[in-house]
Amino acid sequence: MLAIVVLLILLFAQQQQIVEFPWSGRIATALPDAIHGSWFACVTSIVLFFVERVRRGRSAFVATAAIGACMAVGTEVVQGLTGGDAEAGDVFFDLVGMSAALCFGGVRRRMLRPRIGYSATALLLAASLWPVVPALAVEHCRDSIAPELIRFDSPCARELYSVNAPSEIVPAPQPWSIKGQVLEVTLAGDTSIHLDDPIADWRPYGELQIDAFVGGDALLPVSVSVRLDNAPVDHVYRTIDCPPGQCKIELPLDGLFDRETARVNAVVIYSGRAATGRVLYIGRVVLRR
C-alpha cells in the first residue's frame, strides 16, 4: 500500500501533462527525469507483489525484471506515438529504479545480505537522481558570473545560450574595446539568440547592458526581449538601430516591468529577415545597478 501511494504521488509529479511544476528553470525541467528511477522502483515493487502470487523465489524476480523492462520500453514507445518525448535515458533510469526495488525486495525475502542489498538500493536510487546534477552545475556556474548573464569564456557558456543561426565563439574582432571571447552570429532569416533561465530576480538592478559589434557598413536593427513570469505580459522588448562597428545597447529597467513581482525566464536578442547574411557579435550581457 505504501508503494502504491508513493507511486501515485510520483506519477502525478512525473507526468507534467497532468500536473505542472509551479516554477520554471533547468532544475524544474530536470526533475521529471530525476524521479523516473523512484517512480519505477514503486512500479517494480507492485509488479513483484503480484508476480509472487504465481511464482516464488528467483523465478519471481526474473519474471518481474522481464515485465519491468518491457514496461520501461513500452511507456516510452507510447509517449513517442502520442506526441510525447520518448527518451532512451528515461528507459535507462527506469531500469536503475527497477534494480533498486529488486535489491530491496531481495533483502526483505532473505535472498541478499542486508548490508549489500540496502547499500545497493541506496546507491541505485541516488544514481537515478543524476539528471538533476548537470542542471545544478549549470545553475552554480551561472550564479558565479552574475551580474553578467553570460560570459563566453566561462566553462558553462554553451549551456547558457542557444541560437537558431550559424554561430561560433571567437576572439573579439578589431577594433572593439571588448577583450576575450565573443559570440559571432551569421544572421539567417528571423535570427534569435536565447539566454534561457538567467538570474531571475532583477530587483537590485537598474539597467541591462549588451555589448554588440555589427559587421558591415550599414545600420542593423537589433531587438532585445525580456521574457517574464508573474507579469501581466509575457515579454517586453525594445529595438535599437546599431551602427556599424561597436554598439552598446542600454535598456533601462525602470518602468519596463514590475521587478518586485515579475521574474525573468529569458533574454532574447533577435533580428528580422532583412538582416540575412549580416554578421553580429555579442560580447558582454550584464546587469547594472
Image (cartoon, rainbow, N blue to C red):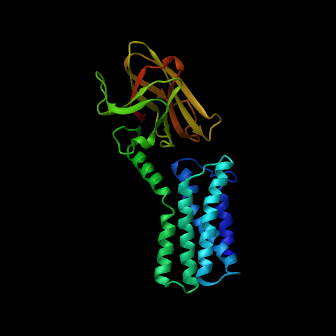
Residue 208, quarter of picture: top left
Q: Position of residue 58 (x, y in %)?
A: 58, 81
Q: Residue at x 54, y 39 (%)?
A: 264
Q: Count the numbered circles shown.
A: 0
Quadrant showing the N terminus: bottom right
Q: Position of residue 146 (x, y in %)?
A: 40, 42
Q: Residue at x 38, y 47 (%)?
A: 144
Which sits in the foreground, 143 or 157? Answer: 157
Residue 57 visible to an observer of this rendering: yes
Q: Position of residue 14 (x, y in %)?
A: 63, 57
Figure check: 276 above or below 24: above
- Say left or right for 38 vs 120: right
Q: Which residue extends farthest top?
A: 218
Q: Residue at x 46, y 80 (%)?
A: 116
- Say left or right for 92 vs 247: right
Figure check: 108 above or below 83: below
- Say left or right for 115 vs 255: left
